[in-house]
Image: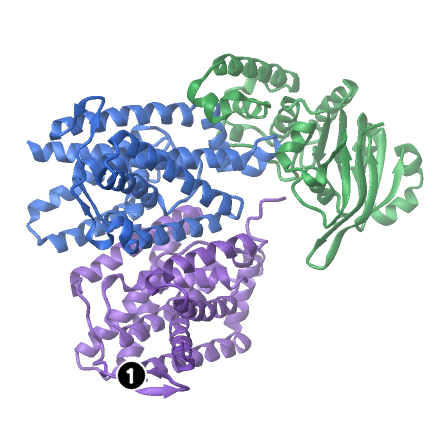
Amino acid sequence: MDYVLHILILAAIYGVLAMSLELVLGRTGLITLGHAVVYACGAYSSAVLTLRFGVSASLGLLAGMALAGAISCLVALVSLRLHADNFVIATFGLQVAGHSILLNWIGVTQGPFGMPGIPRPEILGWRLDSSLDFLLLSYGIVGLAAVVLWRVGFGPLGRLLLAIKEDEVFCRSVGKNVFQSKLTALVVGSMLAAVSGSIYAHYATYVDPTTFTVNESILIISMVIMGGVGRLAGPLLGAAVLVALPEGLRFVGLPEQLAGNLRQILYGLLLILVLLLRPRGLIGRYAID
Amino acid sequence: MSGIVCRGLVMKFEEREVLANLSLDLPETGITAIIGPNGAGKTTLVNVITGFLRPSQGSCVFAGAELTRLPAHAIVRKGIVRTFQDLRLIRSLSVLENVVLARQGQRGEGLVGALLGFGVAREEKENQSEARDILARVGLDSRVTSSADELSYGQQKLLTIACCLATESSILLLDEPVSGVDPATIPIVMGLLQEIAMEGKAVIFIEHNMDVVADFADRLVVMDGGRLIAQGSPRNLLKQRRILEAYIG
Amino acid sequence: MSVSYVAQLLANGVVAGSVYALVGAGFALIYSVSRFFHFSHAATFTVGGYAAWSLMALGTPIVLAGTGGVAAAAVCGLLLERFLYRSFRRRSASALVLLLASIGVYTVLENTIAMVFGNQALSLVQKPAVPGTSIIGARLTEVQLAAVIITLVTFLALQTGSKLTKTALLIRAVASNATLAAARGISLDRVSLVVFCIGSGLSGIAGVLTAMDVDIVPTVGMYPFMMGVVAAVVGGVRSVWGSVFGGYMLGIAQNLSILMVDARWTPTLAFLVMILFLLLRPTGFFGKSVRSTTV
């Protein structure tokens, strides 16, 4: 039973991650290879602040969001005005540099040893301990994230972002500040990813750099593609599928390492197949571009 | 007299001078046609005025603002809107949505507005109603819910003009508004532009079709090699057809 | 801080730079024709290294094994273009889709190699306890010296080839204006095959040279790939030779920076430098004529 709850919680955490990326990638058309870094911002901020400084979980969460927002602002200021491909490269750089910092800044992050013993959070007197508690929390966050993303991604702003994705020159020609809108999408998406990170840290009570590699960024992208863009349920479904699928591999009986490799192979193959044969993904409203 | 005042514009693309010390005045009323051979720099001029290109030298002043220092979207807010030679529209949106998109100052497009939504619903309703009126005016009211993709070429051109009207700009810079449009539709488009000019807006368009220019323009601007060659009334200039033919051919 | 220490860093920089230059050159070559961020370039590197290892494990002499590795990488790139990327092109897939697909390819290839060869480090050559040769106080192993020489020879061959062969002309034609080239009857399909073959081959050379120098793991290709991308950006020009220049500059700068900063921070520094270049010389790599934001 606990195992099922675990899967559901992971699905929720990745669901929020995927939804947040859908705003950036699916709706606004910004290709980022660094989503795992802003995810890590939330996780590590919560870890460091609650573990080392006894800060409350809520504050840790807010700090994580602020950090993620600041970093994505910085990246945006530097590279958003450039040619689209240069933006991909810049986010790639962010991913590598970010992961490198997690690995090497041992004083703060304890590097490859990770940070065990992250305290369980207490929110307004409610101390979250059991899997059931986290199930409630994580799906509550899914709901909140859905509301935020619905307001940002649909309605006039959402329409503008879609237009920017298709033809930003046209948008500029009708008086739209394209840079500002892209920045908005990026920052909102990053801050939501940080929320996910924070929950993950408190749930797993342990974080280490191996969770936040470029593979993770790729995994989140796959969830968005697989589920489909254009509706909020898309990335949620994609997350659920890609979280549940490898669990099925456990029953194949491979040693842990090899199972990990096989899982990655499946992810890669699925990504290619979806892009080639079903660009809309499972329930997307339109193809990724 | 406050139209667009350009002085000493220089624009280089890889050693080639596309605009060579160009100075001209574009009026803020009436219909002006910009003509000249290919490569004369007409589209480049429009790009510079509307902020899509930065000139290496020179200035463009409109309504007291130096346009060469403003980003493109700010220039629209100042009151100058343009269309593109290769017909840009958002094909994944409907006809109505394209026009609503062009409405200025939407609170719903900002983060705070989107999240909190104060007055956004009302603003959206007003914009949609305004957009429908504009579409009715250009003759596209029957296609309001079609995707922009589904329109004919001529209808798409009308849609781009509708978007220009939606911005409530006082100057419309149109890059070949009737090129590629079937001859039956040309008078419809030009008639619409005449109406717009009569409301006190300026319609400035680049055109190669000399008949259209002769029939509809109040004023002519002739460019070649990145310079101003002549300007004045079409009747006078076109009388010097011999001279013009040397340029336009 | 002695002269020989600096010389050592410089020497290390040239060795590292050789690898980055090869990978960057291959990447730029492929990009100039295909116009998308071909992420699986990192995988062809790895394929080269592991193919060479396999051949050596089977008893092939080192030079032949190395050549085999390069060939394997080139073929890998060729197959990818012929059977995957071309299918996407037929469906008018955008650069975004191609990027994502190539990311999928990288994931599949890297993990397949991991499943076949294991995740632990493999050695290609027995490394001597003390590096072999000495130049102005800098010590380099024979392998490292060979690597630099082989790289220089490769670039010489590339330069000669680009001046003399008709293929190079075709590549340049497509790179500068694909539509015009197609109108002139130049087959984009054929040229794509060629650049993927050569570009992946270059990556493969880098992979083989790396495999001979250090132990390899399945993820060995990622870091040089990233550096190759940085090299292409830093090179400041949308050209193969710009990336070569960038690669050497990057390798040397990275190693010299150890004088000031702890070695483990050099990757981060490299990317910060890259971001600086993106700010100051962004038009260099991806070119002004490609999908420019003006009309």
Amino acid under label 1? Pro
Chain in blue (letter): A
Q: Is residue C175 left or right of residue A228?
A: right
The residue that mark 1 highlights is C131
| Chain name for mark 1 | C
Which quadrant of the figure contains the C terminus of chain A? top left
The residue drawn where x is 33% and y is 28% is A232
Q: Is residue B157 left or right of residue C266?
A: right
Local secondary structure at mark 1 = loop
The answer, for residue C264, to whether it is visible in the render is yes
Chain in green (letter): B
Q: Is residue B156 left or right of residue A186?
A: right
Q: Position of residue A118 (x, y in %)?
A: 18, 39
In the rendered image of this protein, does residue C278 appear above or below residue A76?
Answer: below
Chain in purple (letter): C
Q: Position of residue C260 (x, y in %)?
A: 41, 65
Q: Nearer the viewer, residue B85 or C150?
A: C150
Which quadrant of the figure contains the N terminus of chain A? top left
The residue drawn where x is 93% and y is 38% is B239
In the rendered image of this protein, does residue C53 appear above or below residue A134?
Answer: below
The residue drawn where x is 49% and y is 21% is B108
Q: Nearer the viewer, residue A130 or A279?
A: A130
Q: Position of residue B88 (x, y in %)?
A: 59, 35
In the rendered image of this protein, does residue B107 appear above or below residue C275?
Answer: above
The residue drawn where x is 18% and y is 54% is A261
Q: Position of residue B181 (x, y in %)?
A: 67, 33
The answer, for residue C198, to whether it is visible in the render is no
